[in-house]
Every structure is written in structure tokens, then in C-alpha cells.
Image: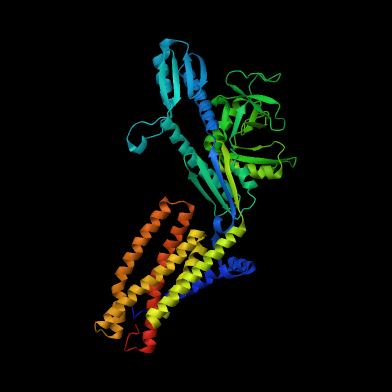
């Protein structure tokens, strides 16, 4: 430890210098912060919701709407399967917890059961990998009727998958808005908690988050309503027009007459030849082929562009659209086309979201938290510094220098990596200070022991550093494992503590052992001590 190569010495000092440079923006004015970010990419730490204020939103999957979508999908699939198998049926009835199919001929019962079994929607292996099939629906036979009923476990698994997909889509939407350091996590079985640090007026974010953005292209039915309150014919449903909600159009629900917007690969705001705001879109290969086939087979017929169960427009198909791209118009404003592009690119939500809770945390609360955290850190730092000086004297000075560098490196790494500092994170910083001095205590006590056992000053110092290394590694490794577990299973605040603690472990290992060793080696070279001042 006392004999270090020139390269190692330069590397240690360069690391310390870089740490000071990249930690510096945290104490500079906003103008200087911007200058350093533009020059070398150095930026201050990002503060979490509890420190800089912002908005906390809790949204919930609309269970009734989600089940309604599943019912509609199942009914359409049943019609298609029976039609393909050439099985006649008298009707399909929606029940409170499922769908009932009545066959025209009892002789087709076994054939119908075989055709409809696949519609139970198996969701993979059973719970806890028991190997038991887990289906969304249970299929039961009641005379000439086949009844689909929701499986409770299947519905819970399906809802959980919907929540996971919703979190991914919401993250994409917020990132497209330029919102950074967001926290989105599942809360309970069907709720999603969203934290937006720094956003005091979340109306725009809420508008994008709550929008389902389900886009479809569906052919219009041949018959259209001639008066209000008319019931649509089979395989048609009534949808309102965007500009005149009182006017209804009947659109076909058959999968053969529908192209799903889920196959979109891109959507961008733009303007048409009349300089009106529109959204241009592009399909993937599957969507392009399906869209091209639909338009080629229905030239001269109108088709509806439907967004969230509202008909945006219903142009005529003048010619086949084979390029897999097109545009959506509908008297949009420029802001509407921009928002619509974001939600279409991110994908449609699998279910409608309901706002459950919205809270705004003011910056004054964050300022108070920062002041309290800084005050606690300063008190802790002063206490540790005094302890080191009183107990270890000159070596205490070395430990305090390493401690200050440790804190600077911790701040620098969090700033460069873009980690968010939370109030629990400040607690992690305070804990890091204690851990850093603890590592130095292990080294100094071992040096003192070797010195008292009769070794020379240089030998005692060298042996003390070398012998204490294994103990320091063991102690910090166990703490690192705890930090990893906390990060893996914890929520936002706990993760903030775990991140700070984990980074603090690595900076402590560097400063308490490597940097302190360099300082002690330099002192030994200059002072040539005959005794160890411990």
C-alpha cells in the first residue's frame, strides 16, 4: 500500500479531480449550471418529488369497461368461429359474468364445443407453476347452450397483465412529453401510482395519461340510422361523430371489416394540402397488408376512422391504399394532432383508466425537506469529523479528507448517472458518512495493534492496511447485498435510499482504503516517521 506506481497515483488523483468538477454544478447558479452542462455535460442532481415538489397521481383500471371490451371481443370471436365451422346459432347473449351461445341444432353441440374451446384464452401455466391450465373463461354446456364465464383467477391474471402493459405505455407517453425522472409503479391489483417531480400543473400529463387512444379503421354498415334511438343491425354498432356527438353512425364490428391501430409503427403531426392539421401514420408489414386488402376489396365504400369509440372521420375509399401509410383528419387543432401523435406512437391502453387521486406537493415542502436533510448531514459530518480528530489525531485528519472526498464523489456519481435524490436518499448519505469512517477505524485500529505488537512504524502501517482489507470487503459486501434487495423489492422512497447506499459503498471502498492509503503513503515519504501517531 505504501509503494504505489506513478500511474496508480495519477489515476487516483484524476478520479478525485473529476469528482469535484462533476459535483460542482450542485452549488452553482442556474446560469453556470447550464454552461457546465453544455460544455462538459456536468449537471446537478435531480431531486425527487419529496424534495422539489410535483404531482402524485393514482389511476385505476376501469373494471367494468375492461370486462365490456372482453365481452365484445369474445362475442365477435364466437361469431367468427361458428361461421368458419359452419355451425348455426340462434343468438349470443351477454350475461353479468360471461356470454351465452344458443345453438340452432343440438347435433352440432360437440362440433361447436371443439370450435369454441380455443376461445377460453389460456393464459399460460397455472399460478405458482403448478402446471394447471389457467384460462380466462370457463366453458360449460347447458342443454343446447354453451356458456362462457369469467374465471376469477384468469380475470385477475388478465388484469395484472393489463396493468403491466399500461405502465409501459404511460412511461412511453410521459417520455415523449419530455417529462424526466418519473416514477410509475403498480399499487395493489389494479391501480397505478405516478409521480411527476417538478410538475405543479399536471393537467396536460393527465389528459395524455387518461386517453385510451384505441384506433381502428372500420367499414360503415350498408344501412345507417334514419332517426334517433334506432338499434343497429347484427354485427354493427352505433358510434358518435367527433364534431356532432348527437349524430350516430353504424360501423361494422366483424374482424374482416376492421384494421386495428395496434399495428401502427409511427404517427406524426403534419398538415394536409389545405394546410389543415392532420396526423400522418404508418403501419407495420402486417398492418400494411391488412389495410391494403381492406381498401382494395371495398373501393367506393366509406370507412370510419375511430378513436376511443368516436368516429373522427369517414372518408370514401377512392383507391386501394397499398403503401401502409395515410393520414387522419378531423378538424384538429395543432395541439390536438401533437397529443394524438404521442398517444398513437405509444400504443393504445388495454383498458380505460379512472382518476382515483391527485395530489400536488408544493416546492416549499421540498425546500423544508432539503433544509432539514442538509442540516442533518452537516451535524452528522461535524460529529464524525470531531470523533476522528479526537481519537486518531493526525490519522483522523487523513480520514476526514477521505470522508469529504467520499461525499463529493457520491454527489458526482449521482449527478452524472442521473439518479434522483429523495429524502430517504439523504438518509443514505448520512449513513454513508458513518460507514466511511467505520472502514478507516478498522484500518487504524489494526495499525495500532501491529504497532503495539512491536512492528516498526512502516511495517505496522503496511500490515494494517493489508490485513484490514478483507474485513472491509466483507462488511461492505453484506451491506451491498442488503441495498440490492431493498432496490429489488422496495418502492420509490426505499429505492432512493438503496441507490444512495449502494453508490456510497463503492465510494467508501475507494476513499477509505485507496485514497487514504495514498495520503498515508505521501505522509510516510515526507515525514519518515519512527513512530505511529495513534
Image quadrant occupied by the C terminus = bottom left
Q: How many marks?
A: 0
Q: Is residue 272 above or below residue 99?
A: below
Q: In the displayed image of the protein, which residue is found farthest to the right?
A: 274
Judge left or right: residue 181 versus residue 462: right
Asked whether the viewer can see residue 247, the reply is yes
Task: State the image quarter where residue 219 is shown.
Answer: top right
Image quadrant occupied by the N terminus = bottom left
| Camera-side residue of 47 and 9 | 47
The x and y percentages for residue 451 are 28, 82
The x and y percentages for residue 22 are 53, 69
Asked whether the viewer can see residue 44, the reply is no
Q: How is the image coloured?
A: rainbow
Judge left or right: residue 129 versus residue 40: left
Q: Residue at x 48, y 44 (%)?
A: 186
Q: In the displayed image of the protein, which residue is found farthest to the left?
A: 453
The x and y percentages for residue 281 are 61, 40
| Camera-side residue of 403 and 369 | 369
The x and y percentages for residue 68 are 54, 28
Q: Residue at x 63, y 43 (%)?
A: 207
| Camera-side residue of 257 and 59 | 59
Q: Is residue 24 above or below residue 529?
A: above
Q: Is residue 309 above or below residue 530?
A: above
Amino acid at each position: 500500500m505504501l509503494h504505489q506506481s506513478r500511474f496508480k497515483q495519477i489515476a487516483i488523483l484524476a478520479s478525485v479531480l473529476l469528482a469535484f468538477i462533476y459535483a460542482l454544478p450542485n452549488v452553482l447558479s442556474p446560469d453556470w449550471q447550464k454552461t457546465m452542462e453544455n460544455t462538459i455535460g456536468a449537471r446537478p442532481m435531480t431531486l425527487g418529488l419529496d424534495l422539489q415538489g410535483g404531482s402524485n397521481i393514482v389511476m385505476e383500471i376501469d373494471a367494468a369497461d375492461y370486462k365490456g371490451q372482453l365481452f365484445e371481443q369474445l362475442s365477435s370471436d364466437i361469431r367468427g368461429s361458428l361461421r368458419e365451422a359452419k355451425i348455426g346459432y340462434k343468438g349470443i347473449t351477454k350475461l353479468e359474468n360471461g356470454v351465452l351461445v344458443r345453438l340452432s341444432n343440438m347435433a352440432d353441440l360437440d362440433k361447436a364445443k371443439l370450435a369454441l374451446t380455443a376461445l377460453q384464452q389460456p393464459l399460460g401455466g397455472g399460478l405458482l407453476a403448478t402446471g394447471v391450465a389457467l384460462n380466462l373463461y370457463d366453458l360449460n354446456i347447458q342443454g343446447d347452450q354453451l356458456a362462457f364465464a369469467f374465471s376469477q383467477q384468469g380475470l385477475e391474471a388478465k388484469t395484472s397483465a393489463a396493468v403491466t402493459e399500461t405502465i409501459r405505455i404511460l412511461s412511453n407517453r410521459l417520455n415523449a412529453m419530455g417529462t424526466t425522472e418519473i416514477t410509475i409503479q403498480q399499487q395493489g391489483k389494479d391501480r397505478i401510482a405516478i409521480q411527476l417531480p417538478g410538475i405543479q400543473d399536471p393537467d396536460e400529463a393527465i389528459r395524455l395519461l387518461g386517453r385510451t387512444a384505441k384506433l381502428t379503421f372500420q367499414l360503415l354498415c350498408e344501412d345507417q340510422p334514419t332517426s334517433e334511438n334506432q338499434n343497429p343491425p347484427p354485427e354493427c354498432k352505433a358510434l358518435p361523430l367527433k364534431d356532432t356527438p348527437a349524430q350516430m353512425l353504424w360501423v361494422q364490428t366483424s374482424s374482416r371489416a376492421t384494421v386495428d391501430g395496434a399495428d401502427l409503427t409511427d404517427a406524426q403531426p403534419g398538415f394536409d394540402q389545405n394546410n389543415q392539421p392532420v396526423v400522418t401514420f404508418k403501419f407495420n408489414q402486417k398492418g400494411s397488408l391488412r389495410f391494403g386488402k381492406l381498401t382494395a376489396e371495398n373501393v367506393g365504400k366509406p370507412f370510419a376512422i375511430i378513436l376511443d369509440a368516436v368516429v373522427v372521420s369517414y372518408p370514401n375509399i377512392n383507391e386501394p391504399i397499398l403503401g401502409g401509410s395515410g393520414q387522419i383528419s378531423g378538424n384538429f387543432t395543432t395541439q390536438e394532432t401533437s397529443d394524438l401523435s404521442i398517444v398513437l406512437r405509444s400504443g393504445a391502453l388495454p383498458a380505460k383508466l379512472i382518476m382515483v387521486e391527485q395530489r400536488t406537493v408544493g416546492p416549499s415542502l421540498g425546500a423544508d425537506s432539503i433544509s432539514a436533510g442538509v442540516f442533518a448531514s452537516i451535524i452528522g459530518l461535524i460529529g464524525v469529523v470531531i470523533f476522528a480528530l479526537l481519537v486518531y489525531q493526525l490519522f483522523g485528519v487523513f480520514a476526514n479528507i477521505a470522508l469529504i472526498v467520499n461525499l463529493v464523489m457520491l454527489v458526482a456519481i449521482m449527478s452524472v448517472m442521473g439518479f434522483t435524490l429523495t429524502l430517504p436518499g439523504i438518509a443514505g448519505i448520512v449513513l454513508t458518512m458513518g460507514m466511511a469512517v467505520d472502514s478507516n477505524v478498522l484500518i487504524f485500529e489494526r495499525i495500532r495493534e501491529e504497532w503495539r505488537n512491536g512492528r516498526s512504524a512502516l511495517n505496522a502501517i503496511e500490515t494494517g492496511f493489508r490485513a484490514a482489507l478483507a474485513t472491509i470487503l466483507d462488511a461492505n459486501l453484506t451491506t451491498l447485498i442488503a441495498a440490492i434487495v431493498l432496490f429489488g423489492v422496495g418502492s420509490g422512497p426505499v429505492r432512493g435510499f438503496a441507490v444512495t447506499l449502494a453508490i456510497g459503498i463503492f465510494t467508501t471502498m475507494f476513499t477509505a482504503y485507496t485514497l487514504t492509503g495514498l495520503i498515508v503513503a505521501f505522509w510516510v515519504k515526507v515525514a519518515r516517521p519512527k513512530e505511529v501517531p495513534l
